[in-house]
Image: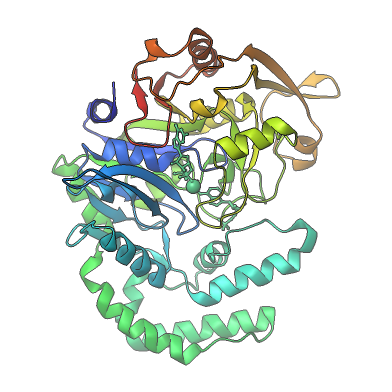
């Protein structure tokens, strides 16, 4: 079963559907968001900013032209011309990037007029936040995070320290200018004077404010009206569980709640509004940026995954580190996010391997750890226990049903499913919309 049919399953509950990255990001969330959005009225982002990079490959328009879209800040559901995009209150928004992305989409033939909305409570990311992001990384030296340098951490820091500026502040010019100057002065005090045209920026934002006005909504009213009118809402998670500020590999994380909690806090909806929670997981593991990665492969299999899987970051172009599927991570991810089903992606990348390994436990001094550890020193020194499964050594990219997959491939899927105790409902066998098996 392919895309359109795959979309229907998420609609059954009549509640908000959520999809979340289950590992360290780049699992293929954009592709599932696109597939599901074919039957959605609203696709919403609730956290993060333009640090995300979601790729969609779709055949669009009357001539079905194969088109690749890269989304960073805007919701991927916009590829469906009937779906509205909503940027919720928990997102941090770099306004120039918002317009650059919107312009790029329009150029590709996607008309977004009247169907893109931005919460008035969302915080703003300014260019000085991006400068500070870079300066902070330099200051950290050898222990730098490897951020995307999009200013995400510094913007969420301004928010948490209660000195940030929100979208609605753009419409009180005097207040905006005063708060803005104070914020920049604070950064100068902390990081030394860097080149920055404060007054020029204030003037630039005056113009942005006018251009942004038609997109702005009261975010709480918007989402609750959509829910009460029984419009089908999909929340597109950004980043991923292991990058969550509380539950990820801190401090090698992003600065927002990328887990299920961030859906409620980022949109202002109660947990009872949520129906399905779909975890998107790659058939192996990748990570961009620094931080421990127990199943990382630095041998030829890692290079194979990297090359065949085209594992380069969409946002920064950095090479993604690759390794075997880590079921310890996935078990932890399932606990926190409570997935009701899973999308296993990029299974086709393992096609030619003789055998496939999965991590099933972490050992410390020969003793199995009960859970994914908080302490990165422990994590960096765990011994990983693997289960080895036979490979299928065949091309699965044209398979349309689970039954068409080779026996060993099905066995791999079933092993993962049994280990996690969560149904794998979708299987990705290629980058395009059509390459999605629905079970
Ligand atoms: P996201 O950040 O989770 O949306 O994922 P990214 O877009 O950053 O990275 C996933 C990459 O894998 C993109 O280039 C997708 O087009 C591609 N992709 C997604 N699913 C599949 C799949 O099942 N097979 C293959 N070969 N590529 C896939
Ligand atoms: P998507 O949505 C992969 C990583 C960065 C860095 C850390 C902190 O495409 O899956 P930040 O700029 O957020 O302060 O960087 O988090 N990171 C991601 N890695 N995919 C992402 O998003 C990521 N968003 C942030 O590489 O290690
Ligand atoms: Mg990505």
Residue 43 placed where, x, y %? Answer: 28, 47
The structure residue drawn at horizontal position 58% and vertical position 85%, both measured from the top left corner, is: 185
Q: Quadrant of residue 294?
A: top right
Above or below, 95 against 253 in this view is below
- Toward the viewer: 257 or 361? 361
| Left or right: where 85 falls relative to 158 | left
Image position of 96 with respect to 217: above or below: below
Where in the figure is residue 419, as x and y percent of width and height? Answer: 56, 15
Q: Is residue 273 visible?
A: no
Image quarter of the N terminus: top left
Residue in front for this viewpoint, 168 or 436:
436
Nearest the viewer among 84 and 167 is: 84
219 horizontally vs 122: left or right: left
The total number of labels drawn is: 0
Task: Look at the picture and state if 223 lies above or below 361.
Answer: below
Is 136 positioned to the left or the right of 334 in the image? right
User: Residue lying furthest left in this view?
Assistant: 229
Q: Residue furthest top?
A: 407
């Amino acid at each position: 079963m392919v895309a359109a049919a795959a979309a229907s399953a998420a609609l059954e509950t009549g509640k908000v559907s959520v999809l979340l990255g289950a590992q360290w990001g780049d699992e293929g969330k954009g592709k599932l968001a696109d597939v599901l959005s074919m039957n959605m009225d609203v696709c919403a982002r609730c956290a993060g900013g333009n640090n995300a990079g979601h790729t969609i490959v779709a055949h669009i328009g009357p001539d079905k032209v194969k088109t690749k879209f890269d989304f960073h800040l805007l919701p991927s559901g916009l590829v469906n011309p009937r779906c509205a995009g909503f940027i919720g209150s928990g997102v941090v928004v770099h306004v120039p990037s918002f317009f650059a992305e919107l312009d790029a989409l329009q150029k590709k033939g996607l008309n977004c007029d009247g169907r893109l909305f931005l919460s008035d409570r969302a915080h703003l990311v300014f260019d000085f936040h991006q400068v500070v992001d870079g300066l902070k990384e330099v200051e950290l030296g050898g222990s730098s995070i490897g951020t995307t340098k999009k200013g995400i951490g510094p913007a969420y820091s301004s928010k948490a320290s209660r000195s940030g500026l929100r979208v609605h502040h753009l419409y009180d010019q005097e207040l905006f200018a005063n708060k803005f100057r104070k914020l920049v002065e604070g950064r100068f005090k902390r990081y030394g004077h860097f080149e920055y045209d404060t007054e020029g920026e204030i003037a630039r934002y005056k113009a942005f404010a006018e251009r942004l006005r038609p997109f702005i909504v009261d975010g709480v009213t918007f989402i609750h009206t959509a829910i009460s009118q029984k419009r089908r809402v999909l929340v597109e998670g950004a980043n991923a569980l292991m990058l969550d500020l509380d539950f990820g590999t801190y401090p090698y994380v992003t600065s927002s709640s990328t887990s299920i909690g961030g859906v409620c806090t980022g949109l202002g909806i109660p947990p009872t509004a949520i129906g399905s929670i779909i975890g998107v997981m790659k058939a192996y593991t990748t990570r961009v940026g620094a931080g421990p990665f127990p199943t990382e492969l630095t041998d030829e299999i890692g290079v194979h995954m990297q090359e065949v899987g085209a594992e380069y970051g969409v946002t920064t172009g950095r090479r993604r580190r690759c390794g075997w599927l880590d079921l310890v991570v996935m078990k932890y991810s399932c606990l926190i996010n409570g997935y009701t089903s899973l999308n296993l992606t990029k299974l086709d990348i393992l096609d030619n391997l003789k055998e496939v390994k999965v991590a099933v436990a972490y050992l410390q001094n020969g003793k199995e750890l009960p859970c994914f550890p908080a302490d990165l020193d422990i994590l960096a020194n765990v011994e990983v226990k693997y289960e080895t499964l036979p490979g299928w050594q065949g091309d699965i990219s044209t398979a349309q049903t689970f039954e068409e997959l080779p026996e060993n491939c099905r066995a791999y899927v079933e092993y993962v499913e049994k280990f996690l105790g969560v149904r794998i409902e979708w299987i990705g066998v290629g980058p395009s919309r059509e390459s999605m098996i629905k079970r």
